[in-house]
Amino acid sequence: MQTEFTRALGIDVPLICGAMYPCSNPELVAAVSAAGGIGIIQPLSLTYVHGYDFRDGLRHIRSLTKKPVGLNLIIERSSKKYLERARQWLDIALEERIEFFVTALGDPRWVVEKARRNGAIVYHDVTNRRHAQKAFDAGVDGFICVNDRAGGHAGSLPAEQLLEAIAPFGKPMICAGGIGRPEDFATALGMGYAGCQLGTRFIATRECSAPEDYKQAILRADADDIVLTEKISGVPVSVIRTPWIEKTGTHAAPLARWMLRGRKTKHWMRSLYALQSVWKLKRSATRGMSHRDFYQAGKSVAGIDEVLPVADVVRRLAGAGEILS
């Protein structure tokens, strides 16, 4: 199952467990890496939800597996305080010998420059060619291509169209979105992707600490149950349709919509949404879900029908890929 991606990272299966707030608990991250893929650490999940000092949390994950793990850094400039924290996380991660980083939302140049000096690799989340061009100019090593079937902040393009748009940059591309079954994994590799990033499939695993009702909601859902809501972060986020989502709607209120259109006010509104969502998601992760909570998930729910150990998920996906190769 070797691809340009696996060879660069020294892993066995071209498979990423994407960073998820609040679902990226240390045991899940480590289990994916131990099984042959690579788990990605989400810093706020590690520190704010699961209560670790950041450096101690990295060392704890290292105690669970000696295989490579990665770190996600959201680098949007709208919050100076958060960006400074991200810089500290990067420094600590490099000191702790993390060698793979996934950046999102901002200009990754400063991450690339520091990572490269330390021999680390940086991939950037992209949803279209314009974002890929900026990341390419910043010197990233590859792209996480977030398509229209992804959970969380989904893209707007199908996987095939996204591949066609970004392939000319000549960098390895990871398919992110819609991968729930071994056949989906094999299809993405067959298209020309160097690997796949999964999130929703790994929530429905035994090692994930997400509440059981969240996992059961994923098992019950079909692709048509995934809707986009603006009420989590101010930009569309993929969630499972529930009675609460239907009652409250998915569009921002008129005042919020007006603020989200403004060049300066959009950052204030997004920050307000983020504060509400971070608290709400932490509560659901630690105390269980309520009828007013939301379940982030992608359209890969259509291929998920049981809660499995991480090793079984990875083994089944890898088996399909080996048949393809």
Image (cartoon, helix red, strand yellow):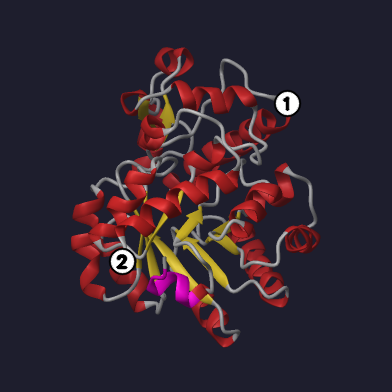
Q: Is residue 175 in sight in this rendering?
A: no
To which quarter of the image does residue 118 belong? Answer: bottom right
Q: Is residue 146 magenta?
A: no
Cα gap from disc 1 to disc 2, whole angstroms: 39 Å
* Residue 61 location (% of width, % of height): 73, 58
Q: Which mark is residue 287?
A: 1
Find out whether the residues at labels 1 and 2 contact each other: C-beta distance under 8 Å: no
The C terminus: image quadrant: bottom left
Q: Residues within 10 Å of mark 1 (few under 14, many from 20)?
A: few
Residue drawn 71% across the image and 42% down it: 49
Q: Position of residue 44 (x, y in %)?
A: 66, 50
The disc label shown at residue 319, or none: none
Indicate whether 79 appears above or below 200.
Answer: below
Q: Residue at x 21, y 53 (%)?
A: 160
Q: Main secondary structure of the magenta part?
A: helix
The percent coordinates of residue 66 (x first, y second) are 70, 67
- Residue 132 is marked as 2
- Three-letter code for the amino acid on which mark 1 is drawn: Arg
Residue 234: image x %, image y %?
43, 38
Task: Identify the residue shown where x is 70% and y is 51%.
Answer: 26
Please state the extent of the stretch shown in magenta in the rendering. Answer: 2-8
Q: Residue furthest front?
A: 323
Displayed quadrant of residue 298: top left
Instruction: Provide the secondary structure element on which disc 2 rests.
Output: helix
Q: Quick check: can you spot residue 165?
A: yes
Q: What kind of residue is marked 2?
A: Ala
Quadrant containing the N terminus is: bottom left
Report helix, strand or loop for mark 1: helix
